[in-house]
Amino acid sequence: MLGYSAEELSQLSFSDLTHSDDVWVENQLIQQVLAEQRNTYTLEKRYICKDGQIIWINLIVSIRWQANGQMQMAIAMAENITDRKQVEISLQQQAQREQMLNRVVQAIRQSLDLQTIFSTAVSEVGNLLKETTRVDIKQYLPERRIWLTIADYTRDLNVPSAVGLKIPDDNNPLAERLKKLEVVQIDNAADLDDEVNRPIAQQFPGAWLLVPLKVEQQLWGCLGLKTLPSTWQPFQIELALAVADQLAIAIQQANLYRQLQTELSDRKHAEAALRSSETRFRQIFSDAPIGMALMTLTGGITQVNQTLCHMLNYTERELIALAFHHLVHPGDLEQYLLLTRQLFNREISQYKWEKRLLKQNGETVWVRLIMTLLQEPNGGVIYQLGMFENITERHAIEQMKDNFISIVSHELRTPLTSIRGSLGLLATGQVGVLTSEGQEILNIAISESKRLVRLVSDILDLERIKSGHISLIKELCQIPDLIARCIDSVRSIANAADVKIEVSVVSVIVWADRDRIIQAVTNLLDNAIKFSMPHSQVWLTVALLTEAKEVVSRTSSTGAPVILLK
């Protein structure tokens, strides 16, 4: 059993064979047996074999006493219980590990403060694994390219703490292994030869065990164990992995808690902002210089401001008692219902419309209406919001302008045409020959009458453009011909202003309205000449671009700015 021969055993005492940790216990038991004169005693102890192996023995000792009370002999029976004892020790260690893990779990449940949890974890591991000299936790900070020690435990209180120690991430082979979520086992740190870990190994010698802390499939840091140089045992690695799993859960819970706190804080800020926004909206709604109304989806008025009340000569209570379509002029009601239906069907996001509303006394008020929908965050519609600008006076002015244009169109063009024809007849000499001075005055009158006709035509064109009634008669046009017509139209003006016109054109054919192009370019040239200094030049350039024709009218550096049309 012990590997000794009988002769070798005869030369040894039981103390020589007994494990040093069990000698004192056995001596104490023997003293007690002798004092009580017990006939038997049983002891589980460790013997050291000849090859140095330690075995567990269940020792049963029978004692024979002499009549005088002296021990005559002792007969011992030894049973090898090494296998059973190893199982018991393993079970005991497993129970201790589970108790330690339970304490760590309890710390996680009782606190969401990571520093408290980390301190509990490293001290529990250090107390359980007596052979460890240091247990620490490092956090990986990729944005700073370092591993920062945030918690540690040392058995020797005289050894300084490593909290705050920064280990570089760059050119660190151990860090690269941890990033691959690999458990790093170093039996002797003195064997490390890289520039990053060699100085750390000198400060913290021995065996290293580094277990990655993985949170949501991302590397968060590592749990580190250090002991005297040795090979890490499977139960030590299993314990470190189990603690690492619990720490990862704690980190994830703390992150979720912080996220929840942030969301609650954001929600409180959002609610405060919403209350502030609602207050501002109510104030803006109430004090707005334009009429405003909140309406239900069916057109019922729920809230109006005083501006709208004054605009329609209703009290707030009277307006709230009405449906909005009762305020719409019958001539505009069909269009209002159509736009409202398009708005509700989300065919349009809002609509702007100039229409008529009816005052309480039946008078008509012209308003510019902007109607939109107020929606909940989930997209549900709450109210219609209408904003009403009183444009009655502007509409009256526009009506006066329309009347003026009508007068210009019908009352001025006819006599202007007659005057121009009469002046033309005088210029032919058919009604008599004028003196040179009279001919000069006549030419001026003809020129000014033509200019007046053009002004009247421009006014009418602007009105047509605004109303959308202008029509373009497009045809194939030669650019050189169009530009020549434009130059002829302003040549007399340029000569009078002592301004020279320089032309550069490309010979291309375009699809355009001949008269409108000539009118537009002539107006540009007229403006360029008007704002140019005497003895200066105006350049008219037509260039062919990849996507458009470009007409440029510009003056010399002493004249007006460049005018560019595409």
Image (cartoon, rainbow, N blue to C red):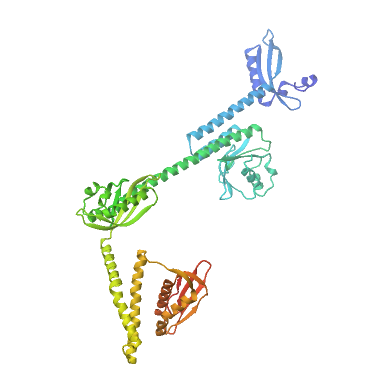
Q: Compared with residue 152, is residue 96 higher up or lower down, i.e. above or below?
A: above
Residue 70: x, y in percent?
68, 11
Residue 23 vs residue 267: left or right?
A: right
Q: Quadrant of the N terminus?
A: top right
* Residue extending furthest toward the top: 67
Residue 202: x, y in percent?
66, 45
Residue 140: x, y in percent?
57, 45
Q: Is residue 499 visible?
A: yes
Residue 278 vs residue 152: left or right?
A: left
Residue 198 vs residue 280: left or right?
A: right
* Residue extending furthest toward the bottom: 435
Residue positioned 35% across, 69% down in the render:
462
Q: Is residue 130 visible?
A: no
**Nearer to us in this view, 524 or 47:** 524
Q: Quadrant of residue 454?
A: bottom left
Counting labels gives 0
**Nearer to us in this view, 352 or 112:** 352
* Residue extending furthest toward the left: 361
**Nearer to us in this view, 3 or 234:** 234
Q: Quadrant of residue 428?
A: bottom left
Q: Compared with residue 64, is residue 278 higher up or lower down, i.e. above or below?
A: below
Residue 58: x, y in percent?
68, 18
Q: Compared with residue 493, is residue 382 higher up or lower down, i.e. above or below?
A: above
Q: Quadrant of residue 188?
A: top right
Residue positioned 34% across, 75% down in the render:
455
**Nearer to us in this view, 476 or 277:** 476
